[in-house]
Amino acid sequence: MALIRRGIEGEVRDILSVSRAAAIVGPRQAGKSTLAKQLQAAGLVPNYFSLDNEQTRKSALADPDGFALSLARPAVIDEVQRAPELMLAIKQILDDDLTPGQFLLTGSADLITSRAIADALPGRVEYVNLWPFAQAELAGTRTSVIDALLAGEPPRVSGAPKGRGAVAKLVVAGGYPDALDRTPRQRLRYFRSYARTVLGRDLPDVGEVRIDSAKLERLLGLLAARTGGLVNYAALGRDLALDDKTIKAHVELLSQLFLLYKLRPWSTNLGSRQIKTPKLFLSDSGMAAALLGADETRYSAPDQGALAGMLFETFVLMEIVKQATWSTIRVEPYFYRDTEKREVDLLVESPSGEVVGIEVKAGTSVDASGLRGLRFLRDKLGARFKAGVVVYCGEHTLPFGERIWAVPVSGLWSGG
């Protein structure tokens, strides 16, 4: 595969220019090491050390202080979660030397939620997430649709390929670099092996060595069948014969390993009680499709609307989540749902309180039900509501009243 520029590269460069350390975190095989090596080759962090290397890891575990002091800096330390004791040694170095750009750390577990790591480095390291490829990165797009929508400018698309099948290949492939060019059978094998390897290899690194990785793998499969749904710990517990508290802890571990994405409900005083339960998504639509045994043909079949809807929503959500890591305006993603059954699948909010609402429909047309939540938020929020879009599988960008449009899914990365 040709070299593909990652959207967060500029962010990482900026962090290293002003902060003592940067950390790139994200799932295994998403491209963290590749990006780190590119920055090494560019001379930004000329020294590279991987804790996936057995001898390097043994050295770091045996003598964290000596190992850290021996490193020529600036340095990359890849897969740093594999030696959490190293963090206190790095902390001491950073406390003694305030020079920016000394370390670039990468991790396949969420370092912020790992207490041994997060407690050592507050104020000393800035974090960025690297997810598997976004379609915008694969297309070479250098801007984020989030910035355009916050400016009230939807992508203007005309003549996009129509129908669920037009994006079937993209949805079931997902964004993992090693999965993109595989056949459906090869991809199924890859993702099942990937999940088993991550749970077997990385679980001890986040401090939960007593958990049965086989049960976590089964839970991941159950969540694939519910991707995009409100989390129901009791129902999951019944399926696995585990109590609610254990299921919740397991979900947190899967999230910490970046296999799940938890979408929080957005709440504000809009005059009706909001749903407070989060939604859970698998973090890659290709992984979800593989765990469900769904290929392009099944995804496109007329009688598979429910499955296609789940996978399509996962695909669109993660495209927005990925673009949010490099958008000029920093945003937080949420969903909206209230007890009056008004809902918006995804909304992003800027630091100034401006909001964009996004509904996701796998069909080729838009009806009133797909507009209800967007219109409600627009009318309640007034000028704070910058744009509402229904992402669908139609051909054209179409207006549906003030500040609301239907946008073909390709508009998320083509720019229109």
Image (cartoon, grey):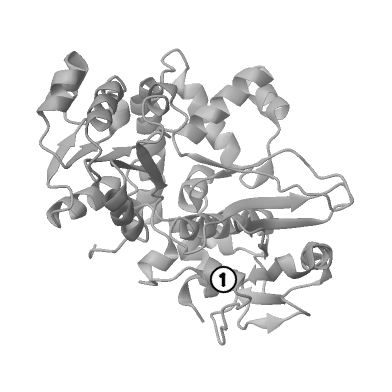
In the rendered image of this protein, does residue 3 appear above or below residue 161? above
As rendered, which of 111 and 260 lies closer to the eye?
111
Q: Residue at x 66, y 23 (%)?
A: 237
Residue 148: give x, y in percent of width and height.
55, 73
Helix, strand or loop at mark 1:
loop
Residue 392: give x, y in percent of width and height.
64, 70
Q: Residue at x 23, y 48 (%)?
A: 36
As rendered, which of 144 and 139 lies closer to the eye?
144
As rendered, which of 392 and 221 lies closer to the eye?
392
In the rendered image of this protein, does residue 211 appear above or below residue 177? above
Residue 67: give x, y in percent of width and height.
14, 23
The residue beneath circle 1 is: 409
In the rendered image of this protein, does residue 316 appear above or below residue 194? below
> Is residue 131 something that shows in the picture?
yes
Disc 1 residue crowd, few under 14, some 14–19, many 20+, Cα 10 Å:
many
Residue 126: give x, y in percent of width and height.
38, 43
